[in-house]
Image (spheres, rainbow, N blue to C red):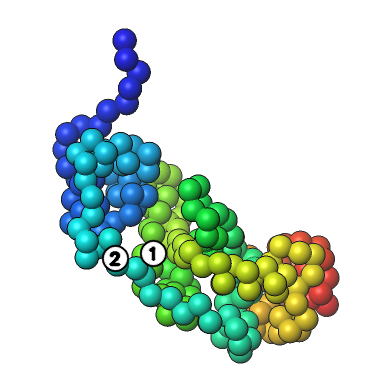
Amino acid sequence: MSNKITLPLETEFEILEYYLRDGDSMLDAGRKVGTSEYMVNQVLNKYNAKLPEYLARRSCTLNEDAFDKLNKKCKYFMGLLFSDGSIKTPKGNKAQALSLGLIDKESIESLRLFLGSDHKIHHDQLSQKNPNWRDQYQLTITSDKLCNRLRELGKYTDFIHPTLAMSSDFWRGYCDGNGSMGIWGKGEPMPEIQFDGKYEWLYQLW
């Protein structure tokens, strides 16, 4: 008996529509129908489906110089990316990809605007899987220049670049990504700000 996984014919047609008509990536088309990028690729090969020439040439806009000048806005987004962002190299792709996922869609949209990007924001509807979970919004952008700039400023080292470490804008972004504010304590409660992260990074805050 064959263990080969197949998809319903209706799902295959949906994949073809998302990929050919809407210009979705294989990953996005798979997410919409609840299957993997591998299965989407199998469907496209089955029907010998290729993007129309005008879609094959289409690329997203992006200002790769956005991190060159460390102004107030840039420092804020650096803090957000240092706390909750990641850099990875997708399988089969030589270029690095910068990714940020947050429950706050507005922050994701602000970052996309700052980068001059029109990349898609993926909505991960986690609340449908578990009512105690909150939906997340994710932006992924492929750019060696942006990723290397983050590395240069200390994203994957023990010490953050001094220009960022001494900036309240940077730490404000960092707190928005991986911090919390509240009032704690017995007796006379006191307002507190809490940060999570590498000891070496937080030590620079003081």
Can you identify the residue that label 1 sits on? 121
Q: Callout 1: few (<14), some (14-19), or many (20+) C-alpha neighbours within 10 Å?
A: some
- Secondary structure of residue under mark 1: strand
Q: In what quadrant of the picture does the C terminus appear?
A: bottom right
**Residue 146 vertical placement versus 72 (above, below):** above
Q: Earlier in the sequence, mark 2 or mark 1?
A: 2
Coordinates of residue 46 in the picture (x, y in percent) = 23, 35
In this view of the protein, which residue sits in the foreground, 135 or 37? Answer: 37
Query: Does the image show residue 110?
Result: no
Identify which amino acid the numbered label 1 is placed on.
Ile
Can you identify the residue that label 2 sits on? 57
Coordinates of residue 57 in the picture (x, y in percent) = 29, 65
Identify the image quadrant of residue 35. Answer: top left
Q: Residue at x 21, y 41 (%)?
A: 48
Identify which amino acid the numbered label 2 is placed on.
Arg
**Residue 155 vertical placement versus 32 (above, below):** below
**Residue 88 vertical placement versus 46 (above, below):** below
Q: How far is disc 2 from disc 1 in space, using C-alphas?
A: 21 Å
Q: Residue at x 17, y 34 (%)?
A: 9
Coordinates of residue 141 in the picture (x, y in percent) = 47, 65
